[in-house]
Image: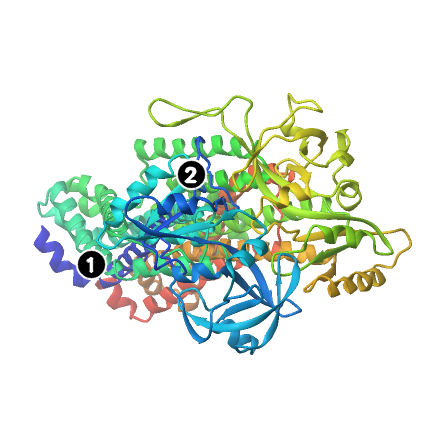
Amino acid sequence: MIGIALRTLRFHKGGFAASFVALLLGAALVIGSGGLLETGIRLAAPPARLAAAPVVVTADQRYAGTVEDVVFPERARLDAALADELAAVPGVAAAVPDVSFPAALGADGSAEATGHGWSAARLAPLRLTEGTEPATDGAVVLGAALAARSGVAPGDRVTLVAGGAAHTFTVSGIAAGPGAADGLYVGDAVAARLAGHPGTADAFGVFTAPGTDTGDVADALRTAVADRGATVLTGDDRGRAEDPAVLAEGEDLVPLAAAFGGLAALVTVFAVAGTVSLSLRRRRRDMALLRAVGATPRQVRRMVVAETFVLAVLATALACVPGPRVGAWLLDTFADNGVVPATIAYRSGSVPLIAGAGAALLTALGAAFAAARAAGRTRPVEALADVTADTARFGVLRLLTALACLGGGTALAVVTAGMPGPEADSVATPAALLWTTGFALLAPVLSRAVTAALRRPVRAAGGLAGRLATLNARAGAARMAAAVTPVMLASGLALSLVYLHTTQADGAREAFDASLRADLVVTAGAGGLPLDAVAAVAERPGVGAASAQVSALGWIEPDEPMTVSDGGEDAGPQPAEVALRGVTAGAVEETTAFHAVEGDLAGLRGDTVALPTARAEGRRIGDTVPLRLGDGTRVTPVLVATVDSRRGYETALLPADVLAAHTDTGLVPQILVTAAPGTDTGDLAASLSALSADHPGLRVADRDALGSARAEQDRTQASMAFLVVAMVVGYATISLVNAQILATGERRRELALHRLVGATRRQVTRMMAVESLLTAAAGIALGALTAACVLAPASLSINGTPFPHGSPLILATVLTAATALTLATTLLATRAALRTPPGTTAGA
């Protein structure tokens, strides 16, 4: 039978080509997603600026003692005096501190750069192409690209904006080397002062003594810093010290790749199963003849499995070539849109290749076996008669699996409806997988129900063509279900994913707009403005109130200490994540919508905090609140007030000077300004702009600028959401096209018989057009049902209503695209089938 299978491949090119394309694309997507997942697990970041140091010691960015892997978003720093201790470790030749700070070249702060201490130039290493090193406090070395862009040369005097102030330096040299392109280097003492975190270092580059083993030195260093909150990095991990966002943001790759891979795998399963099933349905006559001449059910199944296995092996082998490139392209796209740091390197080994190829093979063989069971179980005496039957068999296992998926989707829907809005998508995505799987498994029953409901309208609108279309749909229930499923997948996933994003974006926008009362916002480049700029703004004529705006992330720690179990695993109780905002006491209520429910926000001075009411349960005004700030520092401020916050957007308030000291820059990114009664905001903006003489790079904009910044973040997230939709739904669309072509091609003899009994080409085409519209309507209806099951609980969580937010054009576009694709592919396949003379086709 295997020999027969191989010899018959060439006689069914269309069906096998469709199956091959579905397998190839599905395997490539799964392999690419697997590579992206492995990249997120490895988080390899090859060093550039620290490449010369074989070992790097930096602060541990991970939150110890938590069940979930929590990473501090702000850079945690180490004591600068640790350099002497590291240098004393056996095998260490030198330990060089690295201090970085944001800066901008030019009085307007337009040429942004990153500053470092000159001693860190050894870590790259850098070479001077012109001039000399910065031997004095007033000297600076510029990276070659920064110097060329700014048009300066050694000996020129430049204005450097750093630490919230302008400084004048003389360019002493131009440097080239890894990481130097947009960097600048000043004396170590100057760098420590401008960084705003005196007595600390970002990291230490460790040079080993000649002849020593790097691994042994790294182990000795780990022992030396075991109780200092530090971590020792080697190899590609050293890049994490250059950019802490590799850990803080890079780990987002894991859930992102898992969600993308899960959706791709789901679509692959049903696309391949549907394509293989339709391909085999075209050959029922072959199967029936084999059974009639004595082939056993096992032999028929072996033949089908062998055919599919040959195709699957070829398709998955070819998919191993574009698969890793798909993953690398996705990573580059994520980095270009700011979702993950650009320093993360794509790392994909053999596991994604094996897993992707294995998943494709199992999917293909499982689909082939399921599709061959009907023909294999047919008794020989009934074989030829069974060719004309088209019943949608529905097994017990399939029913139980479908009910289990729907039950899981219902459970997740309940959980989603009760979650805070910003977290709804974390559960809504797996819920979409379950709902889609459940409805796809029930497609034979559901499609029959939908077509039955549409029978009368179709007959009334389509006349004779409509009557024939409904009769065909009823007689070809299995074929109809196979054609409806990809339409449901494409439309359901598109509606679910796109409207989920638009609903979340709308919820975030409403929460942002509701929290803002300011008329103007003052910003600056190079990290922001110094804290004293808030007072300078508040003193300007026409200013009613001015408040700093410092946003960060923190955790409310439990009153009981967090523990680690005897088995080494983290144990509770665990901290609760909360958004933090640094504000100015006495002005926060006039510039934002925060108001005190208990206590007084005017008391936000020194070590104090105002908690959202949802996070203040069990605490009273005057209690201390154990907090962990974004850089890992533990503080215990006094609770002076509680504030109302929208569910899911709870924010704790701290004095701006306290919170800013624990951010990367130590500066104020924004100052919110409310105009005094009767003051023209245009005149006030011009008055505030005059402060740029003391604060270079200062900019004044109206409150719409804040909305624009938030909208830009939404656009970044939207680009990622639409990328996922385009990849997954695009593949589902290809499956839709394959299914419609195969389903129409299967009916060549039927269409020829219509012609032989007197039907014209136009009448046959009209019948097929109505039938394709019926297929599209059934698929879209089931897709809309899937989307409703996903979006209703998510919308309840985000906006308090079961109706998602988003443009109706999205719905219209999805409906139009699904209908047009189904209609176009059916009509093209019908036109091709009608080209052959009906007598030739019917007698074939």
The residue that label 1 is drawn on is 314
**Foreground residue among 176 and 765:** 176
- How far from the left and from the top, in percent, is residue 51? 36, 59
Residue 671 in view here: yes
Tally the numbered discs.
2
Q: Which residue sits furthest right?
A: 678
Q: Residue at point 39% right, 49% down?
A: 257
Q: Position of residue 104 (x, y in %)?
A: 59, 65
At 18% from the left and 49% from the top, the residue drawn is 304
Q: Position of residue 371 (x, y in %)?
A: 25, 45
Q: Element type at marker 1?
A: helix
Q: How crowded is the residue under tag 2: few (<14 C-alpha within 10 Å), some, or many (20+)?
A: many
The image quadrant that residue 310 belongs to is bottom left
The one nearer the camera, 593 or 448, is 593
Closer to the camera, 616 or 458?
616
Mark linked to residue 434: 2
Q: Callout 1: few (<14), some (14-19), or many (20+) C-alpha neighbours within 10 Å? A: some
